[in-house]
Image: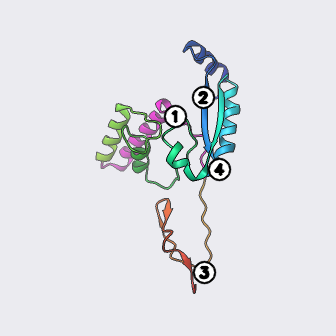
Amino acid sequence: PAHDPEKARHLLKRAGHERLAVDLYTSSYDPIFTPMALAYQESAGRAGIRIRVKTAAADSYYTQIWMKKPLMATYWYTGRPVDQLLNQVFRGGSSYNETAWSDKEFDALLDRARREIDESRRRELYGQAQTLVVERGGAITPMFADRLVGISRKVRGYAEHGFEFDYLHIGLKGA
């Protein structure tokens, strides 16, 4: 969607939230969280929204803040198949649905896509589902990041599984 702070300001006033102020939780757990929160604070401020950036401890962020506070910094690695990502992160009732967004039409699209055997039709259904996430969902996606992995020939036991790797079996040859 186009950035339109004046329209946002108008809609907030019409909804009775002209002086909206919210807490956005972040942490040093990931070095991008706080700069991302500060950029959002500046952007939302143009629409009259006051964002109070609250920094939580890194060692307890995912036990005391994540999915417990209404607005928090988070991220998802890319690399998941689209079906897994949409069902885990956005399906109504999913234990990883960070926004608690629930949309019957969206869930029905996911179900139809899972049953579809025609690859191009399935891709189209997942595209429609992604459009609903953008138009109706509660997640704010400020950026998309690449993941680059570089490994020395001395490393042994490195194996990726989608977006993760096996930490327990990685090591150095000869060590």
Q: Could you tell me how far apart the alpha carbons at marks 4 and 2 are, in whole angstroms?
A: 20 Å
Sequence-earlier tag: 4 or 3 = 4
Query: Magenta stretch?
Result: 117-145
Q: Name the residue that disc number 1 marks.
A: 70
Q: Name the residue that disc number 3 marks.
A: 154
Q: Could you tell me how far apart the alpha carbons at marks 1 and 2 are, in whole angstroms?
A: 9 Å
Marks 1/2 in contact by CB < 8 Å: the verdict is: yes
Specify the amino acid type for callout 4: Ser
Q: In this view of the protein, which residue sits in the foreground, 29 or 103?
A: 29
Sequence-earlier tag: 1 or 2 = 2
Name the front one of labels 4 and 3: 4
Vertical position of residue 58 compared to residue 159: above or below: above
The percent coordinates of residue 81 (x first, y second) are 43, 53
**41 lies left or right of 156:** right
Q: Name which residue lies at 66% across and 23% down.
A: 5
Name the front one of labels 2 and 3: 2
